[in-house]
Amino acid sequence: MHHPAVTRRRCLQAWALGAGPAWAGRGAGAAAPLTIRLSHVVAEQTPKGLALQRFARNVHAAGGGRIRVEIYADSRLYGDASEMQALQLGAVDMLAPSLSKFGPIGCPEFELFDLPFLFSQREQVHRITQGSVGRALLATLARQGLVGLGYLDNGFKHMSANRPLLAPEYFAGLRMRIQSSRVIAQQMRALGAEPVVLDFGETRRALALGVVDGTENPASNFWTQHMHEAQQDLSLTTHGWLGYAVVTHQRLWQHLQAPDRRLIEDALTEALAWGNTIAEQENRSALAAVQASGMTRVHAMDEAQRQGLRQAVQPAWDGLRTRIGPEWMARMRAALD
Ligand code: LMR
């Protein structure tokens, strides 16, 4: 078996050598075959993995097999750091990164979704993602040549480590793996921990080796990455949201015939809506599985503990306001009120 980094390098090399995207050089006829390569970093049995499989099936059915969506799950092709680059280069055609991963590519407004304790219910998230603020955020992706095709839920994140994390004092000195979001980095610093940005696909191993001490994720990712084998305590902090945007590149999108674009959009819209109906249950089942494993203690959090964490992470809000200006914060607030 090849080392994943080697495989990734080969793919980028293949592109550089002219293998090119599967759709390049297609004739103008709407009946030409088309393959869309879609890469993501989580397991198949997660809200994202399942919704994207459904998208592939929808496309297959609607296109009579002429259009194929090839899915590379679980960081098999690219990890967090390389997948955005691969999309820009045309080595893949579609991604579904978490909303936290758009800040580093020049769309810091997406870090609004990372604000700790912004949302307390999934329905509030939908007021943003299914409304005008969500649409305006997707439009900012054009700056990077990307096209935002829609949002998908995962769920609320919890904190894990080899100790309970229900109060700020327990975070002192911990090295916490985070996604590459400045809001999340500031949240961890405000709690007294040291944030360490790592690819999702490397997190479980880093936890097992003690390179990092803890992390944050919804139960579905925690369970399917076997993090329960490396973390003794999972604290149900529900302090932040993990959601996704499905994106493609303008180069591909503009190249497609209008009927194919519509077919892909419709197939995705249905799959994302379906994904949003199963995400909560997937997270509930994953949490039950963690509990049943007996390897990780699961800690509930009371309202006073929640207030303690909420107060401590205030600097993350101040930092984002300074970086993106008060207007986006106000728009988000207005949509939630
Ligand atoms: C993470 O890096 O923790 C998540 O964004 C992974 C994912 O895509 O759910």
Image (tube, grey):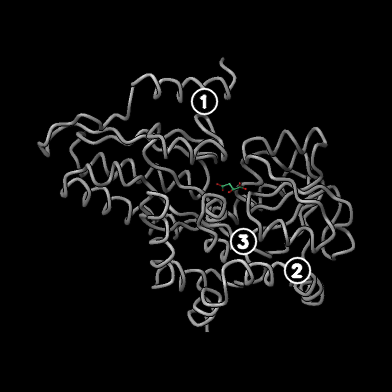
Q: Earlier in the sequence, mark 2 or mark 1?
A: 1
Q: Amino acid at mark 3?
A: Phe
Relative to 328, residue 266 above or below:
above
Please name the residue that numbered disc 2 is placed on: 313
Q: Residue at x 38, y 57 (%)?
A: 150
Q: Nearer the viewer, residue 313 or 325?
A: 325
Which element carries disc 1, helix, strand or loop? helix
- Where does the image place residue 205, in percent across and percent down from the top left? 72, 33
Q: Label 2 neighbourhood size at 10 Å, few (<14), some (14-19), many (20+)?
A: many
Q: Amino acid at mark 2?
A: Val
Q: Amino acid at mark 1?
A: Arg
- On whether ligand 1 comes within 8 Å of the CB at mark 2, the answer is no
Taking the image as shown, residue 4 lies to the left or right of residue 174, namely left
The answer to which image quadrant residue 29 occupies is top left
Q: Which mark is residue 8?
A: 1
Q: Nearer the viewer, residue 143 or 41?
A: 143
Taking the image as shown, residue 209 lies to the left or right of residue 81, namely right
- Where does the image place residue 212, in percent across and percent down from the top left? 79, 41
Q: Earlier in the sequence, mark 3 or mark 2?
A: 3
Q: Residue at x 82, y 55 (%)?
A: 193
- Where does the image place residue 35, in percent across and percent down from the top left? 28, 32
The answer to which image quadrant residue 190 occupies is bottom right
Q: Nearer the viewer, residue 54 or 181?
A: 181
